[in-house]
Amino acid sequence: MQYSSQVLDHFATPKHVGAIENANGMSLIGDPECGDFMSISICVQDWEIVDIGFLCRGCPAAIASGSATAELALGMMLEKAMCLTPEDVSEYLGGLPESKMHCSNLGVDALRYAMADYLGIIQDPME
């Protein structure tokens, strides 16, 4: 399996790792097929994501996708962040192998659940 240099960089030195202390939106999701789990915490002020952190247990593509999702979302207004797609994450990472595209879903879905938590929409992705 061939990973792009961007995937390898985000895997080796992921950005925004860890839960943030001032979070007002959080999520924890998993992919039962591959066993990857991701948590994203966000701090939203005036509808802007001003801080973000992620934790991931997974393969290099999952970790890189969490890092890329956090990089993309930081500084975005919520309505724009809600429009992020797995394809945006994959493109930011210079592409993912087809067998690893589900990893970009993990990052985007975790972000969406964190935003839903901030907005008070009750969702339990682990059900």
Image (tube, helix red, strand yellow):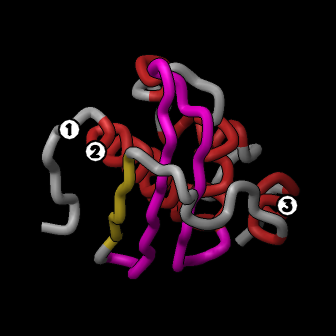
Q: Are marks 3 and 2 in contact (CB under 8 Å)?
A: no
Q: Secondary structure at mark 1?
A: loop
Q: Residues within 10 Å of mark 3 (few under 14, many from 20)?
A: some
Q: Amino acid at mark 2?
A: Asp
Q: Which residue is mark 1?
A: 120
Q: CA distance from mark 1 to mark 2?
A: 5 Å
Q: Amino acid at mark 3?
A: Asp
Residue at 50% from the left image edge and 27% from the top image edge: 45
Residue sitting nearer the eye, 37 or 93: 37
- The quarter of the picture where the C terminus appears is bottom left
Horizontally, residue 86 falls left or right of residue 68, namely left
Q: Residues within 10 Å of mark 2 (few under 14, many from 20)?
A: some
The magenta segment is 33-60
Circle on res. 9 = 3
Residue 62 position by quadrant: bottom right
Relative to 123, say whether 18 is above or below: below
- The stretch drawn in magenta includes residue 115: no
- Horizontal and vertical percent position of residue 36: 44, 75
Q: Are marks 1 and 3 in contact (CB under 8 Å)?
A: no
Q: Which residue is mark 2?
A: 117
- Horizontal and vertical percent position of residue 104: 52, 52
- The stretch drawn in magenta includes residue 37: yes
Residue at 45% from the left image edge and 64% from the top image edge: 39
